[in-house]
C-alpha cells in the first residue's frame, strides 16, 4: 500500500516543480524518414517499409512536410528557429524499436527558447517557458496478449506492431515550471490542452489524445521551499488525457511528500500511470542524456531552413486559439465566465460556425450549451460528434425568430433532427409542429376554454388579470403547445372585456 500525504498538506509543506515533455504526432501523409503511410489503425505491420523496420542497408530521407510542421509549431510557441540543426541517434534497446536507436535531435533542436502563456479556468495566466521543440520518430507498439486490459503484467506473450514506427513527432520540452504551488496539476493539464488547441489550429495534427496523437511525460519533484535546489524528479510516461495529467501530478506530489516527510529519498525513475485509480507505479530507473550515447546521424545531412521561408511560414500562421478567444469574446459580448464555460465544453468551434450561419451569439450559445450539451453528456460523446450541425441550429433558430416555432416546439424539432428525421424544416413538416397563428383557429380554442372555465372568466372580469394564465394554459394544451401564447392572451382579454 503506497503512503500518500493529504494533498493540501503536501503543497503547504513542499514546493512542487514540474517539467512536461509533450509529444505530438504530425499529420503528414508519410512517415518521418520513409514513404510508408502515416495512418492510424490498419492490420499490424502493414504500414511499413524496410526503413521503418530498421532493415540493414535501408537509408532514411527527411520528410520535408514534417520539417515545415515542426517550424510552424516552434513559431507558434514563440521559439527561435535554428539556422542549422541535425538529427542524432539516441541509442537504447526496446522491442518496438527495431533499429535499437531512435532518430531524434539532441543538442541541435529545430526550435528553442520559447514560451506559452496558459490561461487557467479562473482567468489567471501562467507563463510556461519552452526549452526546445525537436523532431524525432515514434516507436512501434507492443501488444501484450493474455494479461488484464492489454497490460504486460500477467500477459502470456507479447507481439510488436511496427505500423507506428517512424511516424513523425515533435517533442516539446519545458524548462522547470515552478511557482504553481497547489495549482500545479491544473497548470499541467491546461498547458497540454493549450498545446492541443494550437496543434489543431495550425493543422499539423489531428491531436486526438485518445489515439495517442498527443502524449505527455510528466516530471514532478518537490523541494522544501522555492529557495532550495530542485529535488529528485520522477517521470510519469505517456499520459494521454487532460484529466489523467492532472491526476498524475496530484498523485506524485502526495506520494513524494509522504516519502520525504518520513525521511526517505525519491528515486529518479520513470513511472506508469493507472487510469483506473489515478495512481502511478515504478517503471525503470531514469536514464540521463549521456546514457543514451547520442551521436550525429551519419545518414542524414543537417537541416538549414531558409530564413525567407521561415518568415513566410510566420506570416502565414493562422489566428492562434488565445487570440481567437479574445476576439470572439469581444465580438459576442459574452461574460468571461460564459466564455470559459464555452471553452471548457469544447463548444467554441460549433458556436462560431452557428453564428457564421446567421444566428445571434446568445441564441447559438443557448442551444449548444443547453439542450445539446445535455444530450452529448447523456450519450457520452463530444458536442461536435452529435447528429446535428451548426447549419441545423441556425435553421432551427431561424424558425423561432420568424414565429414558425416556439422554443418548446423548437426543442421537439431538435429531438427529431437528433433522431435522424431530417433537417429542422423537414421535422417540423413531418411532425406538424408549426405554431398555430390563424386567428380563426385560436378564437375557436379560446371560446372552448372560456366556456369550460366560467369561474376563471369571472375572476379576470373582477380584476384578477393574472388568472388569464390558466386559460392560456388550457388553450396551449388544446393546441398541443402550438399556439402563439402572446396572441392567445390578447384574444382572451378582448373576449372577456378586460383588454
Image (tube, helix red, strand yellow):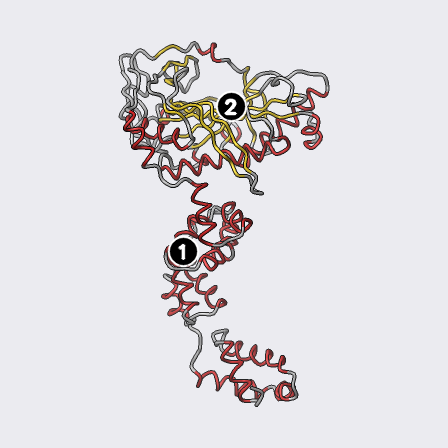
Secondary structure under the numbered disc 2 in the rendered image: loop
Residue 126 position, x and y percent, is: 54, 34
Closest to the observer, 284 or 233: 233
Could you tell me if the residues under marks 1 and 2 are in contact, i.e. CB atoms within 8 Å? no
Residue 490 position, x and y percent, is: 52, 82
Residue 466 position, x and y percent, is: 63, 79
Image point (60%, 22%), residue name: 221
Report crowding for label 2: few under 14, some 14 to 19, many 20 or more residues within 10 A (C-alpha).
some
Q: Is any part of residue 46 visible from this angle?
A: no
Name the quadrant of the C terminus: bottom right
Residue position for label 1:
355
Residue 464 to residue 213: above or below: below
Residue 278 position, x and y percent, is: 59, 32
Secondary structure under the numbered disc 1 in the rendered image: helix
Image point (48%, 86%), residue name: 443
Answer left or right for 36 relative to 387. Answer: left
Answer left or right for 324 relative to 84. Answer: right
* Upstream in sequence: badge 1 or badge 2: 2
How far apart are the alpha carbons under marks 1 and 2?
A: 40 Å
Residue position for label 2:
175
Amino acid at each position: 500500500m503506497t503512503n500518500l500525504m493529504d494533498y493540501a498538506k503536501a503543497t503547504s509543506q513542499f514546493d512542487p516543480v514540474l517539467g512536461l515533455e509533450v509529444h505530438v504526432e504530425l499529420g503528414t501523409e508519410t512517415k518521418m524518414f520513409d514513404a510508408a503511410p502515416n495512418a492510424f489503425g490498419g492490420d499490424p505491420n502493414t504500414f511499413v517499409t524496410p526503413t521503418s523496420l530498421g532493415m540493414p542497408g535501408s537509408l532514411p530521407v527527411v520528410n520535408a512536410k514534417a520539417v515545415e510542421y515542426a517550424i510552424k509549431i516552434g513559431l507558434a510557441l514563440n521559439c527561435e528557429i535554428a539556422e542549422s540543426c541535425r538529427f542524432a541517434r539516441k541509442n537504447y534497446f526496446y522491442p518496438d524499436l527495431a533499429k535499437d536507436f531512435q532518430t531524434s535531435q539532441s543538442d541541435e533542436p529545430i526550435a528553442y527558447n520559447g514560451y506559452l502563456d496558459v490561461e487557467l479556468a479562473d482567468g489567471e495566466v501562467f507563463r510556461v517557458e519552452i526549452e526546445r521543440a525537436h523532431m524525432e520518430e515514434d516507436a512501434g507498439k507492443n501488444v501484450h496478449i493474455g494479461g488484464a486490459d492489454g497490460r504486460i503484467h500477467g500477459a502470456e506473450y507479447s507481439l510488436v506492431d511496427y505500423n507506428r514506427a517512424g511516424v513523425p513527432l515533435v517533442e516539446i520540452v519545458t524548462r522547470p515550471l515552478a511557482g504553481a504551488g497547489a495549482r500545479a496539476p491544473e497548470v499541467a493539464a491546461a498547458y497540454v490542452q493549450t498545446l492541443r488547441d494550437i496543434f489543431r489550429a495550425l493543422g499539423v495534427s489531428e491531436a486526438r489524445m485518445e489515439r495517442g496523437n498527443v502524449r505527455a511525460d510528466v516530471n514532478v519533484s518537490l523541494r522544501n521551499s522555492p529557495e532550495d535546489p530542485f529535488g529528485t524528479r520522477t517521470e510519469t510516461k505517456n499520459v494521454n488525457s487532460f484529466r489523467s495529467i492532472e491526476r498524475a501530478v496530484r498523485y506524485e506530489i502526495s506520494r513524494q511528500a509522504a516519502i520525504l516527510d518520513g525521511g526517505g529519498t525519491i528515486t529518479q525513475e520513470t513511472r506508469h500511470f493507472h487510469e483506473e485509480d489515478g495512481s502511478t507505479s515504478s517503471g525503470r530507473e531514469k536514464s540521463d542524456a549521456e546514457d543514451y550515447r547520442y551521436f550525429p546521424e551519419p545518414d542524414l545531412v543537417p537541416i538549414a531552413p531558409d530564413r525567407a521561408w521561415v518568415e513566410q511560414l510566420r506570416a502565414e500562421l493562422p489566428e492562434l486559439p488565445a487570440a481567437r478567444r479574445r476576439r470572439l469574446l469581444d465580438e459576442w459580448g459574452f461574460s468571461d465566465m460564459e466564455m470559459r464555460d464555452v471553452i471548457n465544453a469544447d463548444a467554441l468551434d460549433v458556436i462560431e460556425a452557428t453564428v457564421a450561419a446567421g444566428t445571434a451569439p446568445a441564441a447559438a450559445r443557448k442551444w449548444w450549451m443547453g439542450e445539446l450539451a445535455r444530450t452529448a453528456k447523456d450519450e457520452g460523446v463530444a458536442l461536435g460528434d452529435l447528429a446535428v450541425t451548426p447549419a441545423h441550429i441556425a435553421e432551427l433558430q431561424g424558425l423561432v425568430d420568424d414565429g414558425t416555432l416556439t422554443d418548446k416546439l423548437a426543442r421537439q424539432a431538435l429531438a427529431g433532427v437528433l433522431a435522424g428525421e431530417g433537417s429542422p424544416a423537414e421535422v417540423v413538416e413531418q411532425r406538424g409542429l408549426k405554431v398555430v397563428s390563424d386567428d380563426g383557429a385560436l378564437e375557436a380554442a379560446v371560446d372552448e376554454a372560456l366556456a369550460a372555465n366560467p369561474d376563471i372568466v369571472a375572476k379576470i372580469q373582477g380584476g384578477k388579470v393574472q388568472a388569464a394564465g390558466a386559460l392560456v394554459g388550457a388553450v396551449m394544451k388544446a393546441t398541443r403547445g402550438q399556439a402563439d401564447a402572446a396572441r392567445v392572451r390578447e384574444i382572451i382579454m378582448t373576449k372577456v372585456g378586460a383588454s
